[in-house]
Amino acid sequence: MGGRVRYQSLTEIEKKKFLGELYDMIALLKNRDEVKQFFKDLLTLSETVMVSRRLQIAKMLLEGYAYRDIQTKLKVGFTTIVSVERWLNQGFGGYREIIKRHKKQEKKFTEHEPALPFSMKHLRKKYPLHFLLWNMVKKIDL
């Protein structure tokens, strides 16, 4: 019985049921940690990298990067970029919507990144009183 299930061999009812349950389950995830744990369990590391690269390709295409630059930076093939661009332009709008939302939330996500040792961010956090005047001037400029 086991083995791979081919999408074409499923009935329309099975396709709708399986995909509907997947979408419903993803929608139940409450925060970034739950999403991370779920996808770590659901996908192999290779599959996760493939999906995340597609998102990066879409993001770079929307930012106006040339195909060659995307190929060089992300080490992906020309056909992958073409496929993502086709989905981006002729798909259901999912790439555009999630990238738009991510841009709005990007600052929130980057705030959780650990500061590199000896970076200004790290030093300001470690020695807040040494940067008291700096922080006050920075707040006034905003």
Image (tube, rainbow, N blue to C red):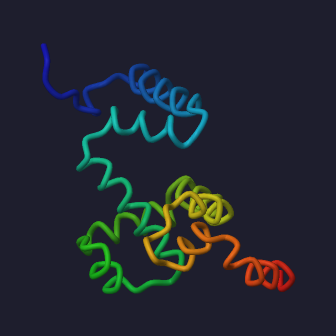
Q: Residue at x 24, y 73 (%)?
A: 75
Front position in the image: 13 or 119: 119
The extreme right residue here reads 140
Q: Which residue is drawn at 52% across and 33% down?
A: 26
Left or right of 51 on screen, residue 96: right
Q: Residue at x 82, y 78 (%)?
A: 139
Position of 27 relative to 58 (above/below): above
Percent coordinates x, y for residue 38 in the rendering: 42, 33
Q: In which quarter of the image is residue 123?
A: bottom right
Left or right of 50 on screen, residue 89: right
How many marks the image carries: the answer is 0
Left or right of 126 on screen, residue 5: left
Front position in the image: 63 or 139: 139
Q: Quadrant of residue 86?
A: bottom left
Q: Which residue is drawn at 46% across and 67% down?
A: 58
Quarter of the figure that contains the N terminus: top left
Front position in the image: 106 or 100: 106
Left or right of 83 on screen, residue 117: right
Percent coordinates x, y for residue 56 in the rendering: 42, 66
Position of 46 relative to 142 (above/below): above
Quarter of the figure that contains the C terminus: bottom right
Percent coordinates x, y for residue 91 in the rendering: 50, 56
Percent coordinates x, y for residue 96 in the rendering: 58, 62
